[in-house]
């Protein structure tokens, strides 16, 4: 049976870990908004995998990074604007691993400067090493709706 102190320590440890993971996602968001490709790349594990549910495929995250690099450059140059936000429905972790489930909202401007939005159900598997948390697997499951996105906001406020 766990003692009160062990339970309190576990809760504090989880609170600290969630703060670290929140900082990780804030860094991903910052890098996207600023068009900081190297900063974004630094959040990814070198052997990371991207899984696309809609395309029914998986491939190295390095291939996705190569494809996304031009968008980061365009954002950095001010040609387009982009941002990403995350909301979570489930968060499991221990000292060195995390599995996060939720929806991300990727917003960007089209060539005419109009904002577009994509809501995506996703899962992320992260590993913590000497240089912090890195995404090992990003599973972009399927499109999400604004209603599902809004429901997660309500859930996180409870």
Image (cartoon, helix red, strand yellow):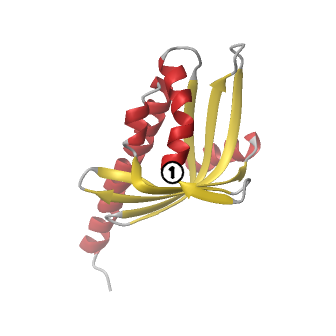
The quarter holding residue 138 reads: bottom right
Relative to residue 77, is residue 119 depicted above or below?
Answer: below
Q: Nearer the viewer, residue 66 or 82?
A: 66
Residue 157 showing in the rendered view: no
Q: Nearer the viewer, residue 47 or 16?
A: 47
Asked whether, in this view, residue 87 is left or right of residue 35, the answer is right
Q: Quadrant of the N terminus?
A: bottom left
10 Å crowding of disc 1: few (<14), some (14-19), many (20+): many
Asked whether, in this view, residue 62 is left or right of residue 152, the answer is left
Relative to residue 5, is residue 33 depicted above or below?
Answer: above
The residue furthest bottom is 1
List x then y, in percent, for residue 80.
Answer: 59, 18
List x then y, in percent, for residue 10.
Answer: 31, 67
Q: Nearer the viewer, residue 21 or 47?
A: 47
Q: Residue at x 26, y 50 (%)?
A: 131
Asked whether, in this view, residue 117 is left or right of residue 83, the answer is right
Residue 118 showing in the rendered view: yes
Q: Nearer the viewer, residue 102 or 112?
A: 112
List x then y, in percent, for residue 126.
Answer: 43, 58
How many numbered circles does the render carry?
Answer: 1
Q: Residue at x 56, y 28 (%)?
A: 71
Q: Residue at x 36, y 48 (%)?
A: 19
Q: Which residue is mark 1?
A: 61
The quarter holding residue 43 reads: top left
Q: Residue at x 53, y 47 (%)?
A: 63
List x then y, in percent, for residue 134.
Answer: 38, 52
Asked whether, in this view, residue 55 is left or right of residue 97, the answer is right
Mark 1 falls on what kind of element? helix
């Amino acid at each position: 049976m766990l003692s009160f102190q062990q339970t309190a320590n576990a809760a504090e440890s989880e609170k600290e870990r969630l703060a670290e993971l929140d900082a990780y996602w804030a860094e991903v968001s910052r890098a996207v908004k600023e068009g900081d490709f190297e900063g974004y790349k630094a959040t990814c594990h070198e052997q990371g995998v991207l899984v696309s549910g809609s395309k029914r495929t998986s491939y190295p995250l390095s291939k996705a990074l190569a494809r996304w690099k031009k968008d980061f450059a365009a954002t950095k140059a001010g040609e387009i604007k982009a941002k990403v936000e995350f909301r979570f429905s489930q968060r499991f972790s221990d000292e060195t691993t995390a599995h996060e489930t939720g929806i991300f909202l990727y917003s960007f401007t089209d060539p005419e400067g109009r904002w577009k939005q994509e809501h995506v159900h996703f899962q992320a598997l992260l590993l913590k090493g000497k240089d912090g948390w890195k995404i090992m697997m990003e599973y972009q499951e399927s499109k999400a709706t604004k209603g599902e996105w809004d429901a997660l906001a309500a859930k996180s406020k409870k």
